Image (cartoon, rainbow, N blue to C red):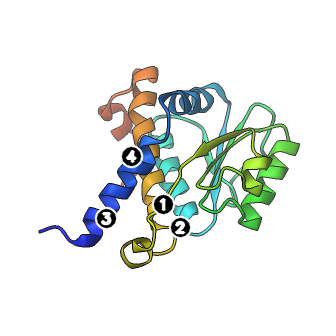
Amino acid sequence: MRTNSLDFLVGEISKSIASVTEEDQNGFVDLLLGKRKIFIYGSGRSGLVGQFFAVRLVQLGLDVHFVGDMTTPIIGKEDLTVLVSNTGETVSTVQTANIARRMGSHVVCVTSKKHSKLAHASNTVIHIPVNGGPEAAEYAPLGTLFEDTVVLFFDSVVPCIMKKLGKTEADMRKRHAIWV
């Protein structure tokens, strides 16, 4: 039996994800495949969403790093920086955008606020509008709608990359964590 919360989430996520155009998705895929290294960052749960995506990109054989990890190299001119922030106002994420741009990296932000500080500091904005109205506080508190929608958006990009790279699930499995 479905709960009101699940029905609410599915409905709202469907509305939000439908607003991302095929052009935006294809442009994002081209950026991911056209750059030397990919750097991903987000704070809090947005960071976890970014890490989730980073794992899939590594399994596809891309050179991916999470900003802030001790082993992360310096960002360069031929690199892509992907930043995730619901509000687009998180100080550490906006600072990361500014630093990455100063280093010459192309910066893509995924945010629900297309006029935020992060959006203005980015080269490319993937706008994931979320609303949910008054029910959101009850059924999807804080950034739940944004985070869940971004997970699905990122997951929808994976098959596109697989196709362009000629990769299969078996290829990805070879890069899966060894203890799994």
Look at mark 4 in the image and give the residue it sits on: 176
Please state the horizontal and vertical placement of residue 167, each as a whole percent of the image. Answer: 39, 26
Please state the horizontal and vertical placement of residue 82, each as a whole percent of the image. Answer: 64, 46
**On residue 130, which mark appears?**
none
User: Disc 4 and disc 2: Cα gap in Å?
Assistant: 23 Å
Please tell me whether mark 2 sits on a helix, a strand or a loop: helix
Q: Which marked residue is nearer to the observer: mark 4 or mark 2?
A: 2
* CB-based contact (under 8 Å), mark 3 and mark 4: no
Write down the quadrant of residue 64 in the picture: top right
Left or right, residue 105 beside residue 33: right
Residue at the image point whose x is 40% and y is 20% from the top: 166
Question: In terms of sequence position, does the residue under pointer 2 or pointer 1 come before the other?
Answer: 2
User: Disc 3 and disc 1: Cα gap in Å?
Assistant: 15 Å
- Callout 4, which amino acid? His
User: Disc 1 and disc 4: Cα gap in Å?
Assistant: 24 Å
Question: In terms of sequence position, does the residue under pointer 2 or pointer 3 come before the other?
Answer: 3
* CB-based contact (under 8 Å), mark 4 and mark 2: no
Position of 34 relative to 136 (above/below): above
Look at mark 2 in the image and give the residue it sits on: 45
Question: In terms of sequence position, does the residue under pointer 3 or pointer 1 come before the other?
Answer: 3
- Callout 2, which amino acid? Arg
Query: Which quadrant is the N terminus positioned in?
Result: bottom left
Look at mark 3 in the image and give the residue it sits on: 8
Q: Which marked residue is nearer to the observer: mark 2 or mark 3?
A: 3
- Callout 1, which amino acid? Glu
Question: In terms of sequence position, does the residue under pointer 1 or pointer 4 come before the other?
Answer: 1
